[in-house]
């Protein structure tokens, strides 16, 4: 489903992480079953998820997408950016993902740092050499993405060396705006009580992808007050439904759409293992919420 807003087309997409799919293998849900479930929840657009979860054969993947009326908007990749010795692996994987993404009509490559690279007591802490590796690997990947005619988006992430606003702004300052765009994740941005709307307004020229996510305000207060580790916070459900969290998603969406934004709009919700509802129910409810916001804006 899509809406025409000020001559721009806005699509609502979803990502495999909403079903707890963070790795290419070892998942309870197969990729074709995932496609069936997102269609049932109302979606017609998706991210690819970790490389290798979906078929990497463009003909097979295109067939399964087309027969369900689905399209791919982006692919997200997680990498140990602070480890300079992994640059060759990043380059190779970027080529692989861009080849597949281009073949199935996707437009955006989203890169984020790997939180599991860091010791539990030093999450996101790097020295200057580590930071330089992050910048250089980001630029390496971005140049490859550009050569495929795709858009590059860096995704700040809780538990990494690019999560706070000062870190994000340093990365933006040290990278070429013609190469490196930003994927603003409203939930990750608000984790530390930062304001995603204000940040978007300051940096909208660099923001070319959006992950819509929300954070449980009451639980966030507990997490910050008690210095609860981010891994535990996610496991216990710090992320919540789009219409129930600390971020005013409706207000954020009005600002986003009024700006003429026309990049990917990806709904995400990281579910706690003991969440009482199914991923399908939550995905459908989030889709209905965002659809209503877009319909309201389109009617103005």
Image (cartoon, rainbow, N blue to C red):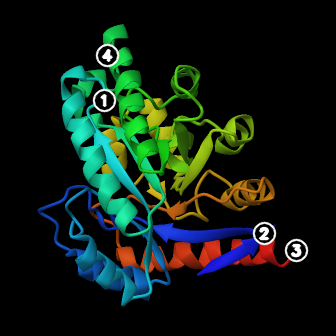
Work out whether mark 3 precedes mark 1 in sequence or the reverse, and give the earlier one.
1
Work out whether mark 3 precedes mark 2 in sequence or the reverse, and give the earlier one.
2
Residue, disc 4: 130
The residue sitting at the right extreme is: 300
Residue, disc 3: 300
- Helix, strand or loop at label 3? It is loop
Residue 276 at what x, y percent from top left?
35, 72
Q: Decide which of 49, 247 is in the foreground and name it.
A: 49
Work out whether mark 4 precedes mark 1 in sequence or the reverse, and give the earlier one.
1
Residue, disc 2: 7
Asked where in the image residue 68 lies, by quadrant, the reply is bottom left
- Helix, strand or loop at label 1? It is loop
Please say if the residues under marks 2 and 4 sit with CB atoms less than 8 Å apart.
Answer: no
Q: Quadrant of the C terminus?
A: bottom right
Q: CA distance from mark 2 to mark 4?
A: 43 Å
Q: Which residue is depicted at the point 59% across and 79% down?
A: 288
Work out whether mark 1 precedes mark 2 in sequence or the reverse, and give the earlier one.
2
Front: mark 3 or 2: 2
Q: CA distance from mark 1 to mark 2?
A: 38 Å
Residue 124 at what x, y percent from top left?
35, 25
Residue, disc 1: 81
Circle 3 Cα neighbour tier, 10 Å, few/some/many (<14 / 14–19 / ≥20): few
Residue 85 at what x, y percent from top left?
18, 23
Please say if the residues under marks 3 and 2 sit with CB atoms less than 8 Å apart.
Answer: no
């Amino acid at each position: 489903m899509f809406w025409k807003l000020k001559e721009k087309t806005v699509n609502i997409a979803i990502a495999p992480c909403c079903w707890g799919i963070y790795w290419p293998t070892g998942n309870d849900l197969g990729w074709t079953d995932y496609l069936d479930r997102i269609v049932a929840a109302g979606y017609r657009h998706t991210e690819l998820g970790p490389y290798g979860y979906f078929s990497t054969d463009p003909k097979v993947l295109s067939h399964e997408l087309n027969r369900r009326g689905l399209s791919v908007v982006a692919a997200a990749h997680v990498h140990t950016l602070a480890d300079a010795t992994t640059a060759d692996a990043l380059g190779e994987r970027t080529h692989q993902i861009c080849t597949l993404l281009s073949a199935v009509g996707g437009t955006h490559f989203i890169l984020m740092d790997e939180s599991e690279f860091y010791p539990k007591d030093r999450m996101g802490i790097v020295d200057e050499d580590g930071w330089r590796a992050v910048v250089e690997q980001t630029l390496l990947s971005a140049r490859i993405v550009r050569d495929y005619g795709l858009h590059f988006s860096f995704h700040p992430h809780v538990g990494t060396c690019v999560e706070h606003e000062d870190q994000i702004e340093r990365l933006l300052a040290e990278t070429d705006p013609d190469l490196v765009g930003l994927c603003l994740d409203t939930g990750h941005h608000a984790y530390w009580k930062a304001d995603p709307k204000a940040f978007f307004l300051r940096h909208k020229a660099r923001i070319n992808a959006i992950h819509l996510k929300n954070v449980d305000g009451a639980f966030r207060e507990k997490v910050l007050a008690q210095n609860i580790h981010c891994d535990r916070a996610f496991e216990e459900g710090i992320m919540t439904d789009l219409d129930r969290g600390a971020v005013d998603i409706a207000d954020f969406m009005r600002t986003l759409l009024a700006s003429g934004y026309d990049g990917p709009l990806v709904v995400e919700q990281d579910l706690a293992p003991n969440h009482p509802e199914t991923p399908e129910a939550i995905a459908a409810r989030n889709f209905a919420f965002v659809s209503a916001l877009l319909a309201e804006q389109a009617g103005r």
